[in-house]
Amino acid sequence: MDSCVKIINEWDIVAARQLGRNVAKELGFGTVDQARITTAISELARNIYLYAGQGQICIDKTEAGGKTGLCISSEDQGPGINDIRKVMEDGFSTSGGLGAGLPGVKRLMDEFSIDSTPGEGTSIKAIKWLR
Ligand SMILES: Nc1ncnc2c1ncn2[C@@H]1O[C@H](COP(=O)(O)OP(=O)(O)O)[C@@H](O)[C@H]1O
Ligand SMILES: [Mg+2]
């Protein structure tokens, strides 16, 4: 079930969304959570495409403390983010996407972590738990 999509062009964003929706369905997420998950994937994949040029999105099943979840991992070796705290403030997002940028991804998912080093790249993980 675990798999990744390389993000190189805009079509790959669609493929990553489809992968996310399929895994979410298989895990038993309802349509509302499926929409939250695919919106989060779109935001992360679009950021890779726009700012890093290329990278990958992986969708994995995750389990902890008897709970099952879906984990989105976004990885790239792009320019990185200088001021993570600033980009996590609402209203910083510039492109006006449907998901409201990285703060939107954090809100749509249950867990969110970002690790970014200028000149090295960005790694983001976001988890949605089944309930
Ligand atoms: N993967 C990434 N690599 C480098 N910079 C990024 C990446 N993702 C986001 N950023 C930077 O963080 C900012 C905020 O991203 P985001 O919250 O998605 O808003 P938006 O894409 O609308 O500007 C972007 O404008 C960009 O400067
Ligand atoms: Mg964005």
Image (cartoon, helix red, strand yellow):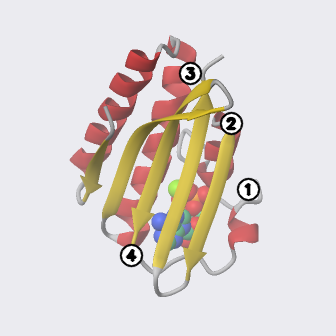
For the C terminus, give its image quadrant. Answer: top right
For the N terminus, give its image quadrant. Answer: top left
| 4 vs 1, front mark | 4
**Gap in angstroms between the C-alphas marked 2 and 3:** 11 Å
Q: Residue 110 carries which label?
A: 2
| Residue neighbourhood size for the residue with mark 3, other residues' Cα within 10 Å, grouped as few (<14), some (14–19), many (≥20) | some
What's the residue at 28%, 56% (across, down)? 7
What's the residue at 61%, 44% (across, down)? 105
Amino acid type for the residue under numbered disc 2: Asp
Are the two marked residues, 2 and 3, in contact with CB atoms closer than 8 angstroms? no
Find numbered disc 2 in the image and state the secondary structure of the residue it sits on.
loop
| Residue neighbourhood size for the residue with mark 2, other residues' Cα within 10 Å, grouped as few (<14), some (14–19), many (≥20) | few
Relative to 1, say whether 49 is above or below.
Answer: below
Find numbered disc 3 in the image and state the secondary structure of the residue it sits on.
helix
Q: Name the residue under label 1.
A: 91
How far across and how far down the image is residue 125, in percent? 55, 52
Q: Nearer the viewer, residue 56 or 50?
A: 56
Q: Residue 6 carries which label?
A: none
Q: Residue 33 carries which label?
A: 3
Tell me: is circle 1 under 8 Å from ligand 1: no
Relative to 53, say whether 120 is above or below.
Answer: below
Name which of mark 1 and mark 3 comes first in the sequence: 3
Residue 122 visible in image: yes
Q: Which mark is residue 77?
A: 4
Find numbered disc 4 in the image and state the secondary structure of the residue it sits on.
loop
**Gap in angstroms between the C-alphas marked 4 and 1:** 26 Å
Are the two marked residues, 4 and 3, in contact with CB atoms closer than 8 angstroms? no
Amino acid type for the residue under numbered disc 4: Gln
